[in-house]
Every structure is written in structure tokens, then in C-alpha cells.
């Protein structure tokens, strides 16, 4: 009985809670003109990091950061990624304990 209560109060984090959040912007495949060939590798890194859903979105993001003078892809990924706001385990346990009574 006590173990069931402890598992309820302190659940394991699901895999979906550990994944990065999707971008907030509107996603589109359309882009005026063609995407240059020399940026396809950077675009694939941006898409793998979860910052853009399409190649056109990734190229728009890349262009925006290049205008600011940021050229390294790891800096762009660090600046543009969204962090999850996770509740601490004790705060979650406190909330669940209050919900029990």
C-alpha cells in the first residue's frame, strides 16, 4: 500500500516529457526562390534539433540568425530551442498529495 502511494506521488517521467518542444511558428513549405545547395546540411541539423518542421522554415530561421551575425549552427540551436518548464518532483508530490484529500 505504501509503495503504491509513493509511486503515485513520485511518478517516472514519460519519454514525451523529455523530448524537445516543437516550434511555435507557423509551418510552411513555400519559400520565394530556391534554397541554396550549400545550406542543406545546416538545414538538416536544424530540423533534427526540432527547431523547424520543413526545409523552408529551417532556412528562414537560418537566415534570421545570419542577419544577427550568428553563423555557427550550434549557437543557433542553443538560442532558438525552447526549454521545457518542469515541475520539481517535490512540488508535483505536494500537488498530488493535496488532490488525494
Image: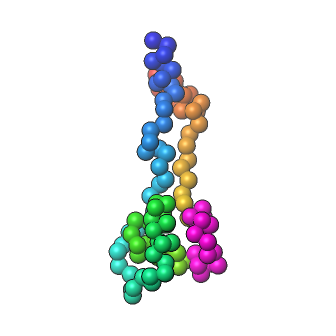
Which residue is pictured at 40% across the width and 65% down the height? Answer: 53
Residue 72: x and y in percent read 61, 72
- The quarter of the displayed image where residue 64 is located: bottom right
Observer-nearest of 96 and 63: 63
Residue 50: x and y in percent read 46, 60
Observer-nearest of 47 and 4: 47
Which residue is pictured at 56% across the width and 28% down the height? Answer: 94
Q: Quadrant of the N terminus?
A: top left
Which residue is pictured at 49% across the width and 66% down the height? Answer: 45
- Whether the magenta-drawn stretch holds residue 80 is answered as no
Above or below: residue 94 compared with residue 67: above
Above or below: residue 8 compared with residue 32: above
- Whether the magenta-drawn stretch holds residue 77 is answered as yes
Magenta region: 65-79
The residue at the far top in this view is 1
Direction from residue 91 to residue 43 in the image, left or right: left
Its colouring scheme is rainbow
Above or below: residue 77 compared with residue 66: above
Direction from residue 13 to residue 29 in the image, left or right: left
Residue 68: x and y in percent read 62, 78
The residue at the far right in this view is 69
Question: Can you see residue 13?
Answer: yes
Amino acid at each position: 500500500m505504501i509503495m503504491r502511494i509513493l509511486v503515485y506521488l513520485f511518478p517516472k517521467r514519460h519519454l514525451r516529457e523529455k523530448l524537445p518542444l516543437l516550434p511555435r511558428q507557423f509551418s510552411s513549405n513555400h519559400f520565394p526562390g530556391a534554397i541554396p545547395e550549400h545550406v542543406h546540411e545546416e538545414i538538416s541539423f536544424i530540423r533534427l534539433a526540432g527547431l523547424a518542421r520543413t526545409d523552408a522554415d529551417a532556412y528562414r530561421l537560418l537566415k534570421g540568425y545570419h542577419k544577427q551575425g550568428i553563423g555557427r549552427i550550434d549557437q543557433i540551436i542553443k538560442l532558438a530551442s525552447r526549454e521545457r518548464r518542469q515541475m520539481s518532483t517535490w512540488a508535483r508530490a505536494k500537488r498530488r498529495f493535496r488532490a488525494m484529500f
